[in-house]
Image: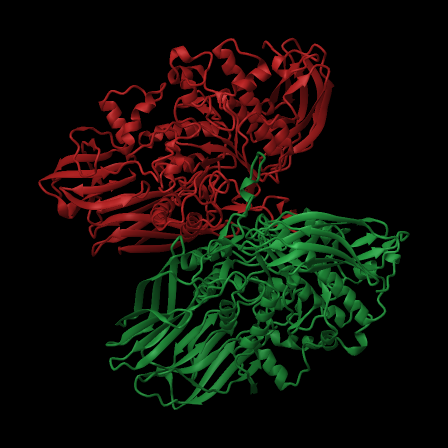
Chain colours: A red, B green
Amino acid sequence: MKVHDRITIPVRWEVGCSAQAETSPAEFVPAQVPGAVQLDFARALHYPDYGSGENFRRFEWMEDRHYLYRAFFPHPGLEPGQRLWFVSKGIDYAFRISLNGRCLYAREGMFAPVEIDLTECLMEENRLEIAISPVPKLHPAPADRSQAAGAVKPPVSYGWDWHPRLIPLGIWDDTVLEVRHAASIRDVHVGYVLSEDLQQAELTLRAQTSAVEGLRYRWTLRDPDGAGVLYREGELEREVEIGAVLESPRLWWTHDHGAPELYESEFVIRSAAGEVLDRAVSHIGFRRIRLVMNEGAWDEPRDFPKGPSVDPIQLELNGRRVFAKGTNWVNPEIFPGTITEKRYDELLDLALEANFNLLRVWGGGIVNKDSFYDLCDRKGLMVWQEFPLACNDYPDDDRYLAVLEREAEAIIRRLRKHPCLAIWCGGNELFNNWSGMTRQSWALRLLDALCYRHDRHTPFLPTSPIYGMGHGNYVFKWEGREVLETMLESRNTAYTEFGMPGISPRSVLERALPAEELFPPREHSSWQSHHAYHAWDALPDTWLCMGLLEEYFGAADTLDQLIERSQTLQCVGYKTIYEEARRQKPYCSMALNWCFNDVWPVAANNSLIAYPAEPKPAFRAVAASCRPVCTSARFRKFVWTAGEMFEAELWVLNDRFAEAPGLKVKVWLETPAESTFLLEWNSPQLKPNANVAGPTVRFALSEDAPPRFVLRLEAEHFPEYDSEYLFLARPKETESPRTAVMNV
Amino acid sequence: MKVHDRITIPVRWEVGCSAQAETSPAEFVPAQVPGAVQLDFARALHYPDYGSGENFRRFEWMEDRHYLYRAFFPHPGLEPGQRLWFVSKGIDYAFRISLNGRCLYAREGMFAPVEIDLTECLMEENRLEIAISPVPKLHPAPADRSQAAGAVKPPVSYGWDWHPRLIPLGIWDDTVLEVRHAASIRDVHVGYVLSEDLQQAELTLRAQTSAVEGLRYRWTLRDPDGAGVLYREGELEREVEIGAVLESPRLWWTHDHGAPELYESEFVIRSAAGEVLDRAVSHIGFRRIRLVMNEGAWDEPRDFPKGPSVDPIQLELNGRRVFAKGTNWVNPEIFPGTITEKRYDELLDLALEANFNLLRVWGGGIVNKDSFYDLCDRKGLMVWQEFPLACNDYPDDDRYLAVLEREAEAIIRRLRKHPCLAIWCGGNELFNNWSGMTRQSWALRLLDALCYRHDRHTPFLPTSPIYGMGHGNYVFKWEGREVLETMLESRNTAYTEFGMPGISPRSVLERALPAEELFPPREHSSWQSHHAYHAWDALPDTWLCMGLLEEYFGAADTLDQLIERSQTLQCVGYKTIYEEARRQKPYCSMALNWCFNDVWPVAANNSLIAYPAEPKPAFRAVAASCRPVCTSARFRKFVWTAGEMFEAELWVLNDRFAEAPGLKVKVWLETPAESTFLLEWNSPQLKPNANVAGPTVRFALSEDAPPRFVLRLEAEHFPEYDSEYLFLARPKETESPRTAVMNV
């Protein structure tokens, strides 16, 4: 049986720039597609690594230029029944496509795909051009994220507290000239509704085709083992709709609760002779995801006058109320055009290693490329997907809303096919004063309406935080209180952003900073440009937190010592938050730190993974805190005084949905000099998805306690459940913490 | 110029009932249209007044019957070019319409209008039939509001704490046979968008017509004085769309902030000869209504982890942040079919008299008839309109959602034409545990999407209360605390439901209750059926609150004494809440009591107006508290002890948007025996829409204080701003309040 595959015609792109739209570029440089015009010029002009020092500033002139991509190609010599298409998954941002001087398409918006049949406009020699407008700016000044408030474009690239100002433009996703048969498939979507008991799936395949007379379609559904479970054939029309029922579908689970089972759908167009003229393969994961009320939340509020109960954020996957452990995902690259499947893959493997089951794709950045969602489908990771709105007041403006509607519709239609998609969300922090949007904002009402229309089975949130959730804080100590204390007093349904800064590993610092600036860190150096000072205005020495590090550990003598201390504090902070959030289950159902990865070589940041994919020590600490089952200790502070009565509650944290025998937990006090046995606790049997609280360990710290000590929880026969907690001890006589110098 | 008006063909309706749908009724009784089948049978069977005693229970058998309306009429002898239409504004609930045995239309839903062209099915003698299904019930038991959770039908009629179980069925709104010209108007909507400075209106008229060739339309817009300001003519098509710009439109204001200016739009279809074949007249009020953030609300929350700011509820009318004073409107009749324009008019005039500017049309009841909104337009009252969802968990169910979508769309298209429409709202108390819906509920996402699509310029709320608002309480004292104390400690952006019970006037009691049950009130009598006992399960003696009345006043000797005491407490409570809510401006922006009117003769209720339109004393008290400008006192309790230091803060409340000179306020202590001058305060100048706080009055209550005393605030030269506050005094030696008997 002959199969006509789509054929890609290789083209060589080049790009030029000019100050005015009307002026043709004087010269062109080679362009990488997908990529970014900035990277093409940087390459041509031999700019040094923008990740290093102040080099990124050299890109500034590129913001306001007009760009013109072009490619010359001969007529591809089509056979009868063949068509030549221009196909792009994403062009950033406002653009105009011409062939041989004739404009074929113009649009604003980087996320909706472009498909243009070029066949009728082809000549013997062809010139394909894509004109790109300058960076969209709502106003000329201030030069910050507020300039992005009129565009459906990631505001993060206009500058953020962990991202330099570098605003990509150009072809950023797969873009090809493609020969297709005249009878080709435009779109296939296999939707389904699961019965309440999850024992039956009602499938509906909807295909748009450019059909011609006398053809047939054939639809095959294969189970995760590759066995065919459904076949349908029929006469091809422009709109094909096929209904089918699948009994006992194998369910898609996150990796920590089962297997991410994927069915394969193959839809083909066949000629009367049986030749395959086109085909579309996609994957289906059967799962039901809901947001249900957090346990205990319906009992509140109690007093009159009475408000509403909080908004639900408990994820229910296939009927299980799963605790969501995860992180905030940001672009892995400043220029998304350079992101490859491999880049996604290495980071997503780290997410698995961290025992995460949910990634919040933060609205300040891009909606990812297809391979990201394919990988999440396969790895069993849930995705909370935001639209590209963040920390701005996006206006009730018809022009903006029209762009948003088209872009959002394309995003929804693209991503709804993925079982990993767990939550739609309007954007980041929109209901706080630094953004200024409200439930009345048209952009958010529109997004909710679109998600309802095209994908109502996936929950929708207007923003994060919503009522009941907590965002922040992002430092170890705030207004005199340590995060350990704050968390004990917090009561939130979800912690959807909490940060803890840590300095990057030395190798990253050596790339980010000139050698002579490495130590000691100073303001107004590249430490500052790389987010160690004045990143977050609320604290001038974020994310380095030099003052705090000195308060806890005294002045550092070396860069390595400074790095170790900063990363230690990051470990302690993150462990505290993840584990306390888990202890607050079932009222609390989610813990996502800010943020997973870095986008470029930073000096310090809240991230767990330094650029490009180097785990910080906090990564391992968090992975331990997120184990499905683990021992845990709850305590109220990090620094204890010699002679003081130390206290910590013992817990077993359990997110598994199976009964398990109780654990025998032994508790040890570890100092460099000795290990002291403190307590043995036989926990009761572990019930599905329920933590167990145990006794409180109490002991008087010795008068000569060493500066650091560790509480170690040892689970007999289950070393994989062991946990360790580091503390500082201060001598009794220390009056002022700032004067306490400890050598560690 | 000849004008062809629509001609109504008089018909005589009758109605029969049967146990099964297939069985024809054995006999028919005369039917009143609009009305309710229950009322027709009650009339035919000579049932006594259902408002009296237990008579309403006699209607119970009618719930599960099938009904058949019918009318016989001869062929109306149409002239050439004439058509006969069946037109109904509302048939309750599931129905099927047939002519001469042929089914022409069937539907579920009481709010979408019905228009059927009967012409082609007419015979010499005609039988028009409307079959009505039994009351929709989600389940057979329990027989309460939860049965309404699958229907777009007011749940209140299934029984509420102020409404007996009496569930109407039948033709409830205007329904006629109408002769129209073949070229007739189906719908006209004049939409507009005001420029940011309100100086220009961009109008768009959209008309649907059953056009025939060669006709013309003419559109005239007249200003509030009747002067034509816009004319447009053109060739008639099925869809007419006309754009126009009006400079400096006169704005629609609520009665307390200006004049409710109404323009008149007249759209006519004309023949080539100039004859008017059909016309549609409607009114337009130009206003911009937004919900903006309450002042001060963006500053919260302060601490990390940080949630979102509260939802905005500050009404902004034409750029003014107006304080909304109003009430919760409930059906004025149990059977809405009997509501007339006159009935609406008398109640709405009382709303004006109460100084209200906003009515919340509560989601437990009906969406009102057209005349209600016409009157609100003309009187300058804003309407917060809920969809018919209340206190139930309306399901994520395709069948229900399909009905809801069609009904809601009809409701939106009908009401969006009215300038009075200030807020759309999904329904009542849906985000609290007694309902169980959340922001994820499909019904509410659907309603938001529909409102966005058809009327996005009007704000939408999913329910009340939302985050920031307070509902309740509904009694004077709760868990040992008086409402006076509770209100001082509350901080809400809006009080959208607060109740204070009062016994009905004697005349109403004499209708509601058998003479022998009148005094003293007892449980298990008609006092109970008429909501004096066990109305609200949380307190068994609501709404009478006999225990509380005895605590404050001792046992009553007569019915009149009991009524006076209950109504006194209601006055004090309501004055406290409205005035404290106003004092909390600008953070607080709204105060709506529960509820305005009664639906039938009740023994006791939170209402201000007894059935049918008899103001209780609390009505006058509230009217005084809601004056645009008034003096006011703030105090922490109602009952004081002889010798105690009395304290009250002085205020001037001002909702007017104009500067005004300060007031000279004299404060008097009034007892039956004497008036004592306490203090004189010269308030500062009154700034627009801003209250003024003054000094605190302090004096020691005399040892022989009489049981009641009054604080009187006298505004020199402005007696219309005077205020009075009643207090109780107890002798010092009284230990237990329950033993204190006071004669008043």
Q: Is residue B563 left or right of residue A275?
A: right
| Residue A80 to residue B419: above or below | above
Q: Classify residue A690 as left or right of residue B242.
A: right
Quarter-wise, where is residue B610 in the image?
A: bottom right
- Residue B277, placed above or below residue A697: below
Q: Is residue A420 at least partly visible in the picture?
A: no
Which residue sits furthest left? A124
Q: Is residue B310 above or below residue A58?
A: below
Residue B336 image point, x, y percent: 57, 73
Residue A369 in the image: state x and y as whole percent: 35, 36
Image quarter (top left, top right, bottom left or bottom right) of the N terminus of chain A? top left
Q: Nearer the viewer, residue A291 or B265?
A: B265
Q: Is residue A136 above or below residue A478?
A: below
On the picture, is B267 further left or further right than B409?
A: left
The image quadrant that residue A691 belongs to is top right
Quadrant assignment for the C terminus of chain A:
top right
Does A428 sit left or right of B18 as displayed?
A: left
Q: x%, y% of residue A113?
A: 29, 43
Residue at point 46% right, 15% down?
A521
Give the total of numbered labels: 0
Residue at point 82%, 63% (across, down): B672
Mark yes or no: residue A740 visible: yes
Residue A129 at x, y percent in the picture: 18, 38
Residue B239: image quadrant is bottom left
Seen as rendered, the residue at the extreme right is B733
